[in-house]
Image (spheres, grey):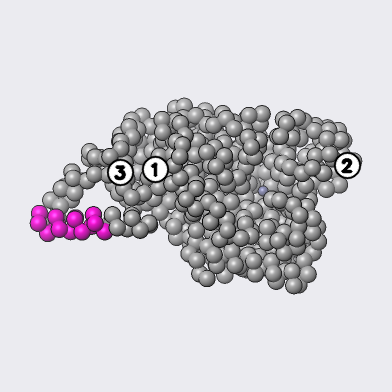
Amino acid sequence: MTECGRHARRLRLAAAGALAFALGFGGALLARAQDASYDVVITNGRVKDPESGLDAVRNVGISGGKIRAVSTGVLKGKQTIDAKGLVVAPGFIDLHQHGQDAENYRAKAADGVTTALELEVGVADVDKWYGERDGKALINFGASAGHIPARMAVMHDPAQLLPSGDAAHREATPEEMQQIMALVEKGLKRGAVAVGVGPAYTEAAANWEIVQVFRVAAKYHASCHIHIRAGAPKVGEPAGNFPGFEEAMAAAAISGAPLHIVHIQSTGGPNVAYELQMISEARSRGMDVTTEAYPYTMGMTSIEAAFLDHKENEPDSYFATMLWPATGEHLTRESFLRYRKEGGMIILPSNTQENIDAAIESRLTMIASDGALFNGHGHPRTSGTYARVLGHYVREKKALDLMTALKKMTLMPAQRLENRAPAFKDKGRIRVGADADITVFDANSVIDKATYEKPLQYSVGIQFVLVNGVAVVKDGNLVDGVFPGRGARAPISQ
Ligand SMILES: [Zn+2]
C-alpha cells in the first residue's frame, strides 16, 4: 500500500468510525456507501474474481490506487467508466516478459497486462534495474535475480541477453561459483521476486551448480523459474528433455525451493502431457511446483544460444523453418551462419499444435508470454498472448471456461509469488483492498492481431486497463503520458 493510499484509508476508517458512533453500525454502512466519492468508478460490468468466484454485475469503486468497494449499489466517482456488457477482471500478470521498456509495456497494456515480470533470465543488478524504471513505466514491473546474468557478469561473457562465451561454455571455478551465488543472493536481498535459471543457455553449468542456485533461492523462499536443459526448441529433432526436467524437479526436492518450469509447451517437446502429469503427481506429494505456457507453435530465442551450436551440417530444410524477425525472411544455411556472427533474435518451430493446445488447456498452467519486442521486431506472443487465449481458446474453441482462463492469467501467477513477495497478495484479485490493476474487455470480440510478420499489431477488445487506479487503456486506445506502473518487489532485507 502506498503512503497516500494508507492515508486515505485511515481517513475513511476514521469517518466510518465516527458515523458508526452517531448512527449505529447499520446506519453507518448505509451512510458510507451513499456518501462515498471515489477517484474512479467502473459501473455495470460483469465482475469476475477467480479467488472468491464472484461472477456478477457490480460497480467497482477505486481510490488511492486501491479497490475500495465492489457493490450492487450506486457509487459516485470523479471519473466513471461504463462497463455495461463488458467483463471486469483483475489485470493480467505476465510472469515471463523479457522486453521491459516503453515499447514493450505499450504492447502488454493493449493485451490486458498490468504487471510484466522478467523472471526466466532475470537481472544481475536488481537495484539498478528497478531504479531505471521507477516513475517511468506504463505498467507494473519486476525481475528475478538471474543465474544467467550473474554467470555472465562473473565470467565476463561478451553477449547481451543470453551468453555466447564462457558463461555458456566453460565450467565455473570454485571461486567463480562462489561469486555467482553471492550475486544471486545479493539480488534476493535487494528484493528480487524470484530466481531465474536457464541451464539450456548455460550448458557448462553442471547439475551441482544448478543445485547451488536452488539452495540460495530456498533460503529466501524464492521460486526458481527455469528454462530446462536440452529442452530448448530444436528444429526437426525430438526433444528428449526428461533429464533436464528431472534435474529441475530434483534440485527443487533437494533444496526445498519452489519450482516454476517456464514455457512447458516448447521445452516439453513431445513430452508435454507426460511432464504435466509428473508435475501434478509431484504436487500431490506436497512439492511446490508450477508451470506456464504461451499459445504459439513457434518460439523465439537468441541465434547465439548454445543449443544452436554445431548446426552447420543440418539439411537445408532445417534452416528453412527458421525466421529472422528483423527482415521477416526464412533462413538458409548461409544466412543462418552469417546472422549467427552478427547476433540477434530468431524465430523457430517449438512444438506441434496438439502439444501447444494440451499445455494451454491444462488447469495446471499459467499463461505467460515470453515476450520481447525490439524496435518493432519480435514474436507476436509479446502483443497477443492473452487476447489469443481469451478469443481463441475460450470463445472460439470453448476449450476453457472464461473464469478458468482468467485464473491462469491473474490469481495463479499472483499466488506463485506471494510467499516471497507479499505485495502480490493484493494483485490478481477484484476485492476491497486489492490493488486497482483491472482489465475490462469485451468477451465477444477480444482477439489477438499480432502475427509473425506484424508482431506489433495490438490486440482488440481490451477496452479499459487500469494500473494502480490510473487508466492506461481507454475505449480500446492506449493513453499517452501516464506512468502509473510501480516496481513489484519483495521486501528488502539488506
Ligand atoms: Zn526460455
- Which residue type does callout 2 highlight? Glu
Residue 466, image x, y percentages: 41, 41
User: Nearest the camera: 404 or 16?
Assistant: 16
Q: Which residue is mark 2?
A: 312
Image: 359 above or below 477: below
Q: Secondary structure at mark 1?
A: strand
Precedes in sequence: disc 2 or disc 1 = 2
| Majority secondary structure in the magenta region | helix
Precedes in sequence: disc 1 or disc 3 = 3
Q: Report how far apart the C-alphas of labels 2 and 1 lie in the structure.
A: 52 Å
| Region rendered in magenta | 10-23
Q: Secondary structure at mark 3?
A: strand
Q: Which residue is mark 1?
A: 470
Q: Which residue is mark 3?
A: 39
> What residue is rendered at 83% in x and 33% in y?
332
User: Nearest the camera: 130 or 86?
Assistant: 130
**In the image: residue 164, left or right of residue 37:** right
- Which residue type does callout 3 highlight? Asp
Q: Report how far apart the C-alphas of labels 1 and 3 lie in the structure.
A: 9 Å
- Is the residue under label 3 in contact with that under label 1 (CB below 8 Å)? no
**In the image: residue 131, left or right of residue 156:** left
| Label 2 beta carbon less than 8 Å to ligand 1 | no
Residue 391, image x, y percentages: 51, 31
Residue found at the far right of this picture: 313
